[in-house]
Amino acid sequence: MKVLVINAGSSSVKYQLIETDDESVIAKGGIECIGLPNANLKQTVGGKTYTDATPLPDHGAAFSLMLHCLTSPDFGGAIKDVSEIAAIGHRVLHTSTDFDGSVQVDDRALAILKKNIHLGPLHMPANIAGIEACMKALPGVPNVAVFDTAFHATMPPKAAMYAIPYEDYEQFKIKKYGFHGTSHKFVSGKAIEYLRSKGLPWGKIVTCHLGNGSSITAVEDGKSVDTSMGVTPLEGVPMGTRCGDIDASVVKMLCDWKGMTPAEVDTYLNKKSGFLGVSGVSSDSRDVLAAAESGNARARLAMDMFTYRVKKYIGSYAAAMGGIDCIVLTGGIGENSVDLRRDILSGLEFLGVKTDEEANSHPDKSSGVAEINAEDSKVKILVIPTNEELVIARETRDIVGKAKA
């Protein structure tokens, strides 16, 4: 089954066409600056990259161009006709409490997604626009919503609930939902497969998705039992521009002391804080780390805050699960930053964590799993490149297959 995987942003679309029979990527691409004069498409097929700079006023025009490029010989001829696309899988931010897994989109599901826009106002409108554009461009082809939050639906109430009046949870569904679910699901599944093949314990895993956005998840017996992000992606560790965990009273203080509105504080905490706000250098950890190594004290503080709080989450989840068998590192930082991995893992020796410095410096990811722990480490430390698109393709195949059965 050929599944088109879509990740639609407010002015961008990332896509992959995946053959689920062998899980190969037929084509992948991205469309940037939708609605702007400099809109552009870049698509890779068979190792060759093709580009286009057609003006794109909206997501509908972007999807029309994408389908043209997937079928055009001038762009690699990934498929001969759009009829080869059996289903479309969409990355969607939020389920609220309406779904606990992926769902085929019909009028009812679409209405529910629109009802939940307020829970993800930065992401949900674009996610929905992507679905609607695909439904219009390819009528009759099933669309499946795969939610960032669904993997975390297994969290018990003691981990997911906030200590606010219960009636407000009941009315407004205010609780921890967590995000990066497709990534945590993929890497924890890959880790379990690896550990079981070696006859090693796999029941208690902490997965660390570390990048411009970061989240940590406790995975017990293959299920999420706690995660660092909350009702929105703001909660948790410091990130590129997000502050992470903060005293809620700071919101009122900023309103009073800086004359900000609540909406302005929301932007301040989501877009102007984190690595950028502390360092004053950049939201990109690579730039901040380089500045820190050049003697910039604020940049060093930003990186120290990040690694310290990731370490705290790992330790707290080990305590919550009553032990830890494995730590998984993924995402742009988790997969690529030798220094930040070292700083995160240093100090966890009391848990039985021991890093092999050579393996950490040169992890062998050729098999999809790189082991960077020392031989006598009681806890396995794995670097696993994430593959959220493959999770979406698999979920879409399974949902559509059940519907046809």
Image (spheres, grey):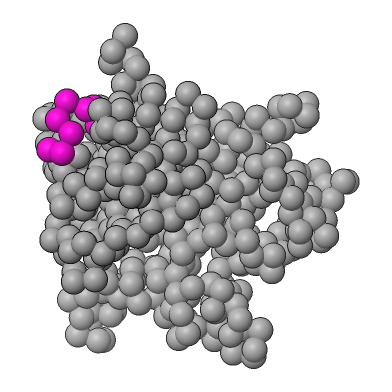
- Magenta span: chief secondary structure: loop
Q: Quadrant of residue 219?
A: top right
Residue 32: where, in percent of width, then height?
A: 29, 62
Task: Give 137 or 370, whichever is nearer the viewer.
Answer: 137
Residue 347: where, in percent of width, then height?
A: 74, 62
In screen coordinates, is 262 left or right of 16? left
Q: Magenta span has 140? A: yes
Which quarter of the image is occupied by the C terminus?
A: top left
Q: Can residue 312 be seen at all in this image of the molecule?
A: no
Residue 341: where, in percent of width, then height?
A: 67, 62
- Which residue range is magenta in the image? 136-143
Residue visible at 50% across and 34% down?
24
Task: Give 47 or 252, whichever is nearer the viewer.
Answer: 47
Q: Residue furthest right?
A: 376
Residue 308, above or below 228: below
Task: Give 217 or 322, whichever is nearer the viewer.
Answer: 217
Q: Can residue 197 be seen at all in this image of the molecule?
A: yes
In screen coordinates, is 244 left or right of 331? left
Residue 41: where, in percent of width, then height?
A: 31, 58
Residue visible at 57% across and 62% down?
333
Residue 98, above or below 331: above
Q: Magenta span has 78? A: no
In screen coordinates, is 108 left or right of 338? left
Residue visible at 62% across and 46% down?
384
Which quarter of the image is occupied by the N terminus?
A: top left
Q: Residue furthest top?
A: 405
Looking at the rendered structure, the number of numbered marks drawn on it comes to 0
Q: Quadrant of residue 233?
A: bottom left
In screen coordinates, is 306 left or right of 97? right
Residue visible at 76% across and 62% down?
361
